[in-house]
Image: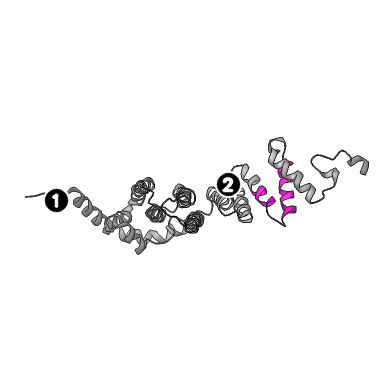
């Protein structure tokens, strides 16, 4: 008598185990959502993207394992420059593991940087307008991953910082970047340089020079370790734009005493 393939036996075990756990899973789902452990209940869209066997495995408590295997598949898609397939895998992985910062972070980076650059330089697309359009779409996808990641991890300074970097480098949105960096800087665990990044972006926003000056001056006043060349240079530029009195400038002008 011919034996059943091992994968079929494993699948049967997972199905039975999954069915047995379903009542428990449903009971825990509400508490998990409150704790941000799930962005939403496992959806029909997730089932369609995973396939029946993997879907049951995910319901059976193997969400992290399924996500890890899919992440390996995403790396294969990256090597094959199959950007559309990779984006779809990233959506599934982040839905399976919405509290994993690395999945949101790397998904955004692959879309907004790797896929976008590949689209811009795509030798198979002769139309420059279409290349630029594809590039902007991947930038949008990268931003979307970060925004969804932040919604699932509102306490994460890392994703806020990444959003600021993306808005600065890919969207030229200095106001948005300043806001994201400011939020990141206010969160526990944020690196000290993030507050400087917020001030730098404010300095690039027309009409917000006074606010930028106050931020940079407060950073400068923290001491020598914060008096970096860019901080000093921007402060001096803003002092000139805002006509700061000579005696109040970080480097008083030589003729300040004569004026007094």
Q: Quadrant of residue 208?
A: bottom right
The residue that mark 2 highlights is 188
Q: Are marks 1 and 2 in contact (CB under 8 Å)?
A: no
Percent coordinates x, y for residue 98 in the rendering = 44, 54
User: Is there any visible trace of residue 82 in the rendered image?
Assistant: yes
Q: Name the quadrant of the C terminus.
A: top right
Colour basis: one colour
Verify whether residue 219 appears in magenta. yes
The answer for how far apart the CA atoms under marks 1 and 2 are is 54 Å
Q: Residue furthest left?
A: 1
User: Is there any visible trace of residue 149 in the rendered image?
Assistant: no
Percent coordinates x, y for residue 198 in the rendering = 64, 49
Q: Which residue lies furthest to the bottom in this view?
A: 44
With 200 as the anchor, is 153 left or right in this view?
left
Verify whether residue 201 appears in magenta. yes
Magenta region: which residues? 198-223
Tell me the SS state at disc 1. Answer: loop
Q: 75 or 9: nearer the eye?
A: 75
Badge 1, how many Cα within 10 Å: few under 14, some, many 20+? few
Query: Residue placed at 69% from the left, 50% from the top?
Result: 203
The residue that mark 1 highlights is 4
With 170 as the anchor, is 13 left or right in this view?
left
Percent coordinates x, y for residue 33 in the rendering = 44, 59
Q: Which of marks 1 and 2 is in front?
A: 1
Q: Which comes sooner in the sequence, label 1 or label 2?
A: 1
Query: Residue placed at 44% from the left, 59% from the top?
Result: 39
Badge 2, how many Cα within 10 Å: few under 14, some, many 20+? few
Percent coordinates x, y for residue 103 in the rendering = 44, 49
Residue 17: image tag: none
Q: Which residue lies furthest to the top in this view?
A: 224
């Amino acid at each position: 008598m011919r034996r059943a393939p091992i994968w079929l036996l494993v699948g049967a075990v997972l199905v039975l185990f999954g069915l047995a756990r379903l009542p428990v899973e449903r009971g825990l789902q509400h508490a998990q959502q409150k704790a941000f452990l799930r962005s939403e209940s496992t959806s029909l869209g997730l089932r369609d993207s995973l396939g029946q066997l993997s879907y049951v495995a995910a319901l059976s408590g193997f969400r992290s394992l399924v996500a890890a295997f899919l992440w390996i598949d995403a790396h294969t898609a990256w090597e094959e420059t199959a950007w559309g397939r990779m984006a779809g895998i990233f959506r599934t992985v982040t839905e399976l593991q919405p509290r994993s910062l690395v999945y949101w972070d790397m998904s955004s980076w692959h879309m907004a940087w790797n896929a976008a650059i590949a689209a811009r330089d795509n030798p198979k697309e002769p139309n420059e307008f279409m290349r630029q359009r594809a590039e902007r779409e991947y930038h949008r996808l990268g931003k979307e991953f970060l925004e969804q990641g932040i919604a699932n991890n509102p306490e994460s300074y890392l994703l806020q910082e990444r959003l600021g970097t993306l808005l600065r480098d890919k969207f030229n949105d200095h106001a948005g970047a300043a806001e994201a960096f400011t939020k990141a800087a206010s969160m526990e665990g944020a690196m000290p340089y993030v507050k400087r990044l917020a001030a730098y972006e404010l300095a690039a926003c027309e009409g917000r020079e006074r606010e930028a000056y106050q931020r940079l001056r407060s950073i400068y006043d923290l001491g020598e370790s914060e008096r970096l060349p860019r901080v000093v240079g921007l402060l001096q530029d803003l002092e000139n734009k805002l006509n700061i009195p000579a005696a109040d400038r970080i480097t008083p002008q030589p003729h300040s005493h004569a004026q007094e």
